[in-house]
Image (cartoon, rainbow, N blue to C red):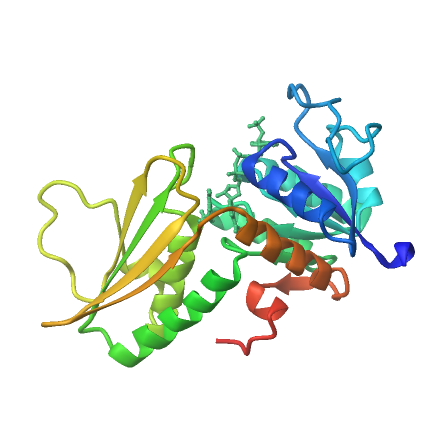
Amino acid sequence: MASSRIKIGVLGAGGRMGQAIIAGVGADPQLVLAGAIERAGHPLVGRPLGPPFPTSMTICSNHGPLANSSDVLVDFTAPAALEATLDAALDGKAAIVIGTTGLEPRHHALIDRAARSIPVLQAANTSLGVTLLARLVADAARALGPEWDIEIAELHHRHKVDSPSGTALALGAAAAAGRGVDLARVSDRGRDGITGARVAGHIGFAALRGGSAAGDHSVLFAGDGERIELRHLAENRDIFARGALRAAQWLAHQRPGRYTMDDVLGLPSR
Ligand SMILES: NC(=O)C1=CN([C@@H]2O[C@H](COP(=O)(O)OP(=O)(O)OC[C@H]3O[C@@H](n4cnc5c(N)ncnc54)[C@H](OP(=O)(O)O)[C@@H]3O)[C@@H](O)[C@H]2O)C=CC1
Ligand SMILES: O=C(O)C1=N[C@H](C(=O)O)C[C@H](O)C1
């Protein structure tokens, strides 16, 4: 029934993920596109969204009307855009899925504040596979103990602007939680030069950039004489869009609060 379709508002309409989300909404009969925006002055503002949307549906640049007409906003943009987006979501009483990475503690504080009034789901990776991988990583880190060195490597396309990826950091946080330590105290990022021997208990990160890779992540547990590697390879962006839209459908029915992909999938808390 048309009235029960969930209205999705897309931010970053011209971006790689924005495009994947718009295509996902167009293909899902349970969803309807409330609108899609880009920042003011962007060359796509005023352009039609294209099939399957009516030609009258164009890319806009105002958060307010988008939030007012959406049940759920879906944000894959940049950290600098987050505060204005959250303000609009709060004013319009719209739920919001945040997939943007590169977030800093002040962004998480803004998310926590917004989640007191609206449903908010923030996930550095909305794929089913990475959601499950994080649990496997936490379990492995817990079972193996600190004698096993943990190194996280990721590969992304040449356009990615943040490093290490949000997913790598989330996997690091899962490993640290499994070990019962704080990632901020044990993280080694960007080794270069005479760094000295590896510090026991640290979690290392390495970021590769090149080509069109949608996003590969590998968590290495290196022990004496043996290694375990847990990996996730993204073949395309549809996996992220599918997960984000599944999250949006779920979030539309939730009370205000801050949620994760584990909540969407009904997985017990870690
Ligand atoms: N959670 C997940 O599963 C995934 C998360 N991501 C994350 O999503 C984000 C977007 O990725 P991707 O689509 O590849 O990136 P793109 O660069 O292709 O798209 C980003 C979009 O956001 C817009 N934007 C950038 N800065 C601002 C700003 N300050 N205000 C308003 N709009 C802005 C861009 O507009 P303009 O062209 O004008 O810059 C563009 O439309 C990244 O943080 C990425 O890491 C990506 C894939 C999966
Ligand atoms: O920028 C990307 O492309 C991706 N970003 C996310 C991240 O930083 O982890 C998720 C995915 O790996 C693709």
Question: Is residue 189 in view from this perspective?
Answer: yes
- Nearest the viewer among 28 and 151 is 28
Does 260 appear above or below 114? below
The residue at 23%/62% (across/down) is: 202
- Judge left or right: residue 111 versus residue 198: right
Seen in the image, is 13 located left or right of residue 124? right
Percent x, y of residue 142:
32, 78
The quadrant in which residue 33 appears is: top right
**Residue 235, position as x, y percentages in the image:** 44, 50
Residue at left offset 78%, top offset 54%: 29
- Between residues 163 and 229, which one lies in front from this camera angle? 229
Q: Is residue 112 visible?
A: no
User: Which quadrant would residue 148 be assigned to in this image?
Assistant: bottom left
Horizontal side, residue 149 vs residue 22: left or right: left
Quarter of the picture containing the N terminus is bottom right
Q: Position of residue 206 (x, y in %)?
A: 27, 48
How many numbered badges does the structure rendering display?
A: 0
Residue at (58, 63) in percent of width and height: 260
Query: Is 228 above or below relative to 60?
Result: below
Query: Could you tell me residue 96's position as x and y percent?
Result: 69, 52
